[in-house]
Amino acid sequence: MFKQHADLHPRLQQLPGVVQGRFAETQARIDGTGDEVLDYRHAVKRYHGCRQIVIEGGDHAFRDFGEYLDTVLEFCGVSALHR
């Protein structure tokens, strides 16, 4: 059902196995368990040590992005939008 990252693009095979150290502090991930293209478990393992949010369900188009906009802006150091 899910494809491995390496199956999607050969250059991805060249990436290191786990994101660590200072680089991990600059990374944040939001993944959904229902992504029909990428298996979120690979990202959870690869980005261990980074800020991660795993959403139950969801899809590859990440249609719920608006619900996480304040979280993304906070991570970027930007004040949340006033609605």
Image (cartoon, rainbow, N blue to C red):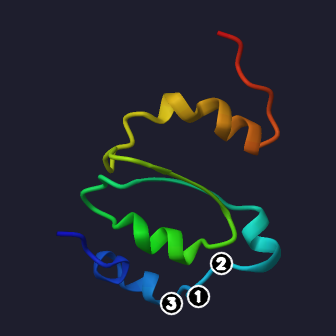
- Residue where numbered disc 3 is placed: 14
Q: Residue at (36%, 85%) from the top-left corner? A: 10
**Residue 59, horizontal then vertical, whole percent:** 31, 47
Of marks 3 and 2, the one in the foreground: 2
Name the outermost residue toward the top.
83
| Nearer to the camera, 49 or 28 | 49
**Distance from label 3 to label 1 (Cα)?**
7 Å
Give the amino acid type for the residue marked by disc 1 in the picture. Pro
Q: Regarding mark 3 in the picture, which secondary structure is present there?
A: helix
Residues under labels 2 and 1: Cα distance?
A: 7 Å
Q: Which mark is residue 19?
A: 2
Horizontal side, residue 71 vs residue 39: left or right: right
The image shows residue 42, relative to residue 64, as above or below, that is: below
Q: How many marks?
A: 3
- Spot the residue most to the front: 56
Q: Are marks 2 and 1 in contact (CB under 8 Å)?
A: yes
Could you tell me residue 77's position as x and y percent?
82, 40
* Residue 41 sits in quarter: bottom left
Amino acid under disc 3: Gln
Tag 2: amino acid: Val
Q: Residue 16: which disc?
A: 1
In the displayed structure, 25 sits above or below 5; it is above
Contact flag, marks 3 and 2 (Cβ < 8 Å): no
